[in-house]
Image: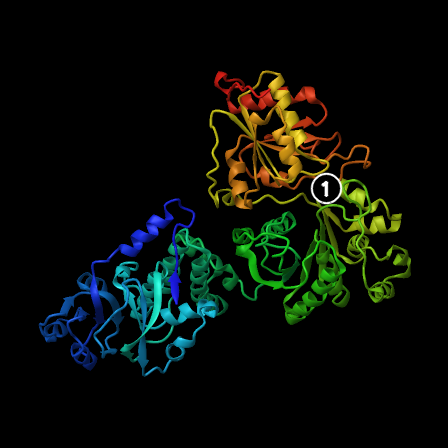
Amino acid sequence: MKIDFKINMQDVNSDYINKEIEQFGAGHEPGVSVIQAVDVWHESVVHNIGQVASNTQLIVATTDEAVYERIPEGENLLAVRGTVEDAKLYVKFSHFIILAAHQKIDVDNYDFSWQKQDVILCGFEEARGVDSRIYKHFYDTFDHLEEAGSGYGLYDKLVKENTVLLPSAKLFVHEFSGSLNLRMNIWLQQLLAIASLRGELKKSESVTVCKELDRGFPESAEELLIMISRIDAQLQKRYDSRLTDMLNHFNKQLTVPLKNKLDRGELEKETLISDMKKLGIKNIFYKALNKGDAKKLVLAYCFPPYNDTSGNVMAKRIHESGEIVDIISNNMDRIRTKDEKLLNLVSELLDSQIMLDGPQAFSSWGSIESYMHNGYQQFLNHRSKYEEIYSRAMFTQSHFLGYEIKKNNPELKWVAEFSDPLHKDVNAEMRYAPVEDDDYIGQLKADLDPKYHALINDNVFNLCEVLPFIYADELIFTNTHQLQYMIERFDSDLRELVLAKATVSQHPTPPKPMYSLVQSYYKLDATAINLAYFGNFYDTRGFRQIELVAKQLYDQNINNFRIHVFTNLRGNTMRFYNGSDFKDYITLNPYVSYFEFLNLAERLDILMIFDAETVGIKPYNPYVPSKLSDYRGSSSFVWAFTEPGSILDATVEERIAITRQHEYHEYVPTFKTLAGRLNKDLYRADMITCSK
């Protein structure tokens, strides 16, 4: 079975680095070096001395002078005054193992044909503890092990007992600490050695370890934190995702005892987290520390690690609230990409995330029904925890589950948030998706006051507004225009009901550290004025608007600028771009990940944002672009192209410049003002182009 963990996966030199690591220590002769840590004389030392041979070495590490004096002189037999760390310097053979004072080793066959980068499973006798018996079964059945199904448990078995021969090239991946007991030091030695290996896992019938290590985790929080910090140092490197998952597995195991101490009142949570941060631990396993603490249940059909604007906003809402939550989301592999880093938005406040595996769709009844049914069953499993539920649409599935829980548990507070109007789209056309269950519609009417029956039909998007409007205890809207637009179709009684429990809250802004979580290496000319547009191109917002900005600037003899566009590179966009007279001033790029976007937003000079065009379509503009909240957290200027009377148009902030979209004569004066604040030139001779 292969063990193939690579570092620096994003480095251009990664292959070279990995090969160099493989070659480190290649000069060791084939054989086994045994380091035995001995504080007082033990009969096992006598036994192990008898195993010394031409390719088997015993190094006794001791701080006891009497032990040191009793070790006879001999080839491949050595006593070292000091610790295991001191003994490592004398290892001469290709593989090594570290034993406790009471442990014995039997080497029956001295013909070792292993490769120097391989890990070798030893036999095991006198296995009494749980970990050692698990390892023994693993060793006995190794020949029938299916590589694909090994999982993290495989590494548990390799790490938790000193029953493997490791390549001597990995001697110095861990420095033994006097603050940790021997077992924990050996754990880290084996874990960190395996974490940088690229070899085979093989079984040996010729080497057997007798008696297990002392049992248990470290007793003190200090020791646990040392263990976690050593693992975290590896997590901060650029490893492949399999290794990151494996290291996180051990991170979680070591965090659970800390949670137990919190629950017993032996530690204070804020102090513990502060101590972890002081140690430089960045990958704090909050889910373990928060286990069982959630009083709020968030219903978010699409949620990180899936990359989706609605899910990201929900994660930012959680961060803004500061409350520990459970989440019921759904597997979105078919329709959304994954970005594990997105969980950083909410990780400090996450108790449990329950990910259902139902159908994945925008608004189909099958996906809604599955999420409702399975989500409600998950709610029942933990019903006693919750005081509040919070749902957000898009996607529609979330509000349907919110209604189902509220209907059956009326004492729970239900907060429902709307990202945009649902019943009508951006072109003021009614959205429609059928409820394919007449019994469901009949039950809704049976549960509702008869005065609301006329509002119930078979349209998913209608019900997704109506049910929260009637049943939710609090309604969140992103702006006042959205609120007015969504309730204008109802009678005065329902409008008053909604207004009485409505709160207006624009999309939350990410915390400042999120803007440096991922470093972007996108190339920028620091002397030019760098503008950027991030987001989809739609019917009401597209490449032509970007091109128009470039044209207005060019026509007024401004050329020291570049507009960097990060969008969905569809056929129409590429055709418009290739035919543009101003493409020398526009650079098209595919989307970047969310955190690279935040980092770019911090690095660029001017961030462009456009209102959706609704004049002649809607009575007023009910939208606020969600990117505005992300832009607000950066240090860059924001250039907003607005519709008269929109929420964005009325925004007054020091770093936001407003230009009406169709007042083209204002483009250049606004840009000149921004260029002056940036202290950058408008024109450069070396930027003259000949594309026109």
Question: Which quarter of the figure has residue 657?
Answer: top right
Question: Which quarter of the figure has residue 69?
Answer: bottom left
Q: Is residue 426 visible?
A: yes
In front of the other: 587 or 279: 587
Q: Is residue 1 above or below residue 298?
A: below
In front of the other: 397 or 542: 542
Q: Is residue 43 above or below residue 425?
A: below
Q: Is residue 212 visible?
A: no
Q: Is residue 621 above or below residue 255?
A: above
Query: The N terminus is located in which quarter?
Result: bottom left
Left or right relative to 3: residue 663:
right
Left or right relative to 382: residue 67:
left
Q: Indicate the position of residue 137 as horizontal and vertical percent values.
A: 40, 80
In front of the other: 599 or 273: 599
Return the residue found at the far left: 73
10 Å neighbourhood of mark 1: few (<14), some, or many (≥20)? many
Q: Indicate the position of residue 414 as horizontal and vertical percent values.
A: 72, 58
Left or right relative to 417: residue 205:
left
**Residue type at tag 1:** Asn
Q: Indicate the position of residue 388 as horizontal and vertical percent values.
A: 68, 61
Query: The C terminus is located in which quarter?
Result: top right
Q: Is residue 388 above or below residue 543?
A: below
SS class of the residue under badge 1? loop
Q: Indicate the position of residue 617 as horizontal and vertical percent values.
A: 81, 36
Look at mark 1 in the image and give the residue it sits on.
Answer: 479
Count of marks overlaid on the render: 1
Applied colour scheme? rainbow
